[in-house]
Image (cartoon, rainbow, N blue to C red):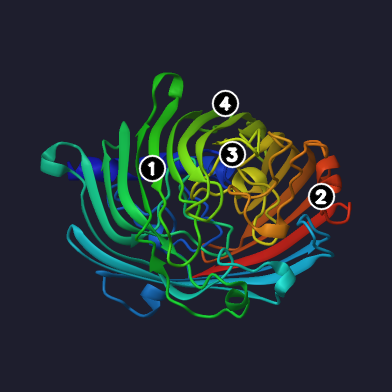
Amino acid sequence: MKQRKELTGTAISYAMNLIISGGLCIGAIDDIQAAEKKKYVRVPFTSYSSQMQDALLGSDKYAKPVWNLHDALKAPDWLDIGVDQRTRYETMSNSIKAGSKGGDQQIALQSTLWLQAHMGAYRVGTEFMDSRALNSDKATGVNNTMVDTWDFLQAYAAWADQNVLYSGIGAEVIAGRQTLNFGSRRLVARNTFRNTINSFTGVRLRLTNYEKWQFNGFVSTPVDRLPTSSAATLNNQQVFDREDTHTWFSGGILELNNLDWGINNEIYLYHLDEGSSTSAPTRHRRYFTPGARFFIKPAKAKVDFQLETVGQFGWVHETTNPNSKKLDHTAWFQHADIGYTIDMPWTPRFALEYDYASGDKNPYDNNDERFDTLYGVRRDDFGPTDIFGAFSRSNINSPGLRINLAPRSDVQFILSHRLFWLASATDCWGNATCSGGSFILQDKTGRSGNYLGQQLNLITRWDFNSSLNFETGWSHLFKGSFAKNAPNAPAPVDVDYFYVQSMLRF
């Protein structure tokens, strides 16, 4: 069995990476080239060391950085060590926030030290992370999605066996504080563009039959990033994060590989039971979120597609006051895309995309119909976040077009264009809970219409080597009638957002 694992490790690693990315992330075209040319998979533009080794697949997902701290220190084989540092400058002209004026800018710094010791089937590890926002002011709206100073992102113990009782089944158990990254990453993900990263404390069980299927089940409590006040985060104040022991997040996802016609499938169910947090007010959400995804991975001269349908039901309080009205919650989300990769120089891939996330149709009844993306990421579908973050997976109706180009193995371009409408004209344009006070645009009368506008995105990436990467991006929002006319809307002027960032790994 050991020989079988070694022979299939590289192929399985590549397949599982595409399952995680869903074929839509920035590295989709490069994943194809990596498999065909036997080169490393393009790493995400964020701290990634804790994901380098896969205890079940038997091979590294990414190439070892050419500038390698482990080798430079002559560390023992049983110890893994890595340092990552990302620096991003971002600037935005004009605004999309209610009651705001002018543009904004920020320097986002993200640094990570990762250590892991392993002995046989057992390992223990920790990831120490520092996220800061420089050159910001009160108008930036700095919060704990941008700042989490000097804290433990992960601290875990794990056990893994690639062939339990010679059954051909691999099993892994991880206990402690950890990051989670499942499926299309639209509901549970390790953040890649955002300056801070979600983490959870609990137990995760993973089972895999390698080429055929994989199952992940978990029970956890979310980790609250601290501090939460605007003044404290603006000053990069250090407060150690704490587990929100009043909230439980659990679920399971089954992945089935290479069904008929090369189709892959995921079926999942997540449960969020939110209590009274000691660090920040909550709306006491109790959500059950079932979903399914079918997709074919991108390949040269082939059609690929992705279809994901998600339901959501339960209840939520009207406000953060636990004595406020309890609302029945029923919502849903739909993603669809179809693409084709041309077998020619630059490997162009063209794709049509569509996303719909329900909004609340009547803000005055006893029902809540606004979809909540839980702990998912939105950058891959809707463009950059942080000080921009114009669109989220709530109350949205959006078709789009995407083009990927790879003129060289180390260079990539992505051009996307999307149109946006509100799914419900009476619901807000903002985050999943419509919280945020004056920053949220909403017209409960519906008289401002539902057209938000168009967004054009351009991303360029260059990999100098496996240790140093550069990326730049530009987004232009052509404001629609709602963005211009909603109550307390900022100046009816289009918005430009630009960023440039570097990532150093060693």
Q: Secondary structure at mark 2?
A: loop
Q: What residue did someone put label 1 on?
A: 271
Q: Alpha-carbon distance for marks 2 and 3?
A: 20 Å
- Nearer the observer, disc 2 or disc 3? 2
Q: Are marks 4 and 2 in contact (CB under 8 Å)?
A: no
**Amino acid type, residue under disc 4 in the picture:** Lys
Residue 300, image quadrant: top right
Residue at image location 65% in from the left, 65% down from the top: 501
Going from N to C along the chain, the mark reached first, 4 or 1, is 1
**Amino acid type, residue under disc 3 in the picture:** Arg
In terms of depth relative to the viewer, which is nearer, 343 or 148? 148
Q: Dot 4: within a 10 Å radius of its alpha carbon, few (fewer than 14), some, or many (20 or more) residues? A: some
Q: What residue did someone put label 4 on?
A: 302
Q: Is residue 442 shown to the viewer in this render?
A: yes
Going from N to C along the chain, the mark reached first, 2 or 3, is 3
In terms of depth relative to the viewer, which is nearer, 104 or 231? 231
- Nearer the observer, disc 4 or disc 3? 3
Q: Alpha-carbon distance for marks 4 and 3?
A: 36 Å
The disc at residue 487 is 2
Q: What residue did someone put label 3 on?
A: 370
Residue at image location 27% in from the left, 55% down from the top: 174
Using the image, determine if residue 274 lies above or below residue 360: below
Q: Is residue 348 shown to the viewer in this render?
A: no
Residue 359, image quadrant: top right
